[in-house]
Image: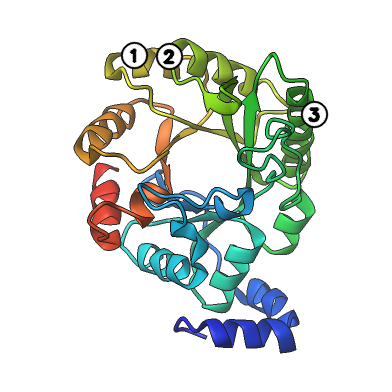
Amino acid sequence: MSTLSISELTHVRATRPEAIAEAAAARTRRPLLGDTGRLMIVAADHPARGALAAGSNPMAMANRADLLERLCTALQRPGVDGVLGTADILEDLLLLGALEGKVVIGSMNRGGLAGAAFELDDRFTGHRAADIERMRFDAGKLLLRMDPDDPGTLNTMCGAANAINELAERGLMAMVEPFLSRRVDGRVRNDLSPEAVARSIAIASGLGGTSAYTWLKVPVVDDIDQIAQVMEATTLPTVLLGGEVSADPAATHERWHKALQLPNVRGLVVGRTLLYPHDDDVAGAVDAAVALL
């Protein structure tokens, strides 16, 4: 299957569910890092957390056919190394043949639903390390939001440490996305101050019985002059996350460009900013991000 057809995808899922495992077994793999030593990953693990908004559209990611079309466009652009997603999305892309020669990262903890009272008790309800190994994927991604006032944080930290250990036992990368978070008017907000980001990096770097396979996925702080100081908190390989769709793409690109000059910053993992740009030109947004690498 090479063209997008929701009816065909559903038909295959209904009549030949084993086709997913067959596609995974036959997929052409590649090294994690190519000749450039950099990574450009497109992220699409938001829907499983109930986070469907992109920019001003609160339901942008609710249309699966549209999302898959945008992902296929992005994955076909030169310089894009791979994708980060939940099982449903990655399996659709497998059936479409869109993951050939790409780095594939499975999203592991999706239990902290957006807006839920238990949002920070973010249990591992997505990929397990065993699933990532079985599907011949390349890494697992875990979100680690920590609020000292929320007891659920400890469950999330324990789950993160276990996932790091289980991935490391299989020689698979664990991509950890840490934040210090707090509730404001009942909603979880991430603290993006340089001090908070550096502290979250320090905590995440020490999780698990080994950090040999741990990478970090971190935000770029608003104060460009403090990016280098924040990155001094770890020696682990680090990628930058894209976050919300920016109202000022030029300023976002400037922050990414400066951070990418630092020795431990190895690439970008960007989702909605590339998949739902203001001008709706997915290929153009992806190409502009790739150029920064």
Q: Quadrant of the C terminus?
A: top left
Q: Position of residue 213 (x, y in %)?
A: 64, 37
> Residue type at mark 1?
Gln
Q: Position of residue 68 (x, y in %)?
A: 47, 69
Q: Between disc 3 and disc 1, whose residue precedes?
A: 3
277 relative to 208 in the view: left or right:
left
Establish if 198 lies above or below 241. above
Direction front: furthest residue? 185
Label 3, label 1: how far apart the Cα atoms are: 31 Å
Establish if 72 lies above or below 52. below
Disc 3 element: helix
Establish if 219 lies above or below 52. above
> Residue type at mark 3?
Asn
Check residue 59 in the rendering and tell me which mark sits there, or answer none: none
Direction left: furthest residue? 250
Q: Residues within 10 Å of mark 3 (few under 14, many from 20)?
A: some
Determine the residue positioned at 45% across, 21% down: 192
Q: Are marks 3 and 2 in contact (CB under 8 Å)?
A: no
Disc 2 element: helix
Check residue 155 in the rendering and tell me which mark sits there, or answer none: 3
* Quadrant in which residue 254 is drawn: top left
Disc 1 element: helix
* Quadrant in which residue 91 is drawn: bottom right
Q: Nearer the viewer, mark 3 or mark 1?
A: 3
Numbered circles on residues, count: 3
Name the residue tied to disc 1.
Answer: 226
Name the residue tied to disc 2.
Answer: 194
- Residue 213 seen anywhere in this rendered image of the structure: yes
- Residue 16 seen anywhere in this rendered image of the structure: no
Q: Are marks 2 and 1 in contact (CB under 8 Å)?
A: yes
Front-most of residues 84 and 61: 61
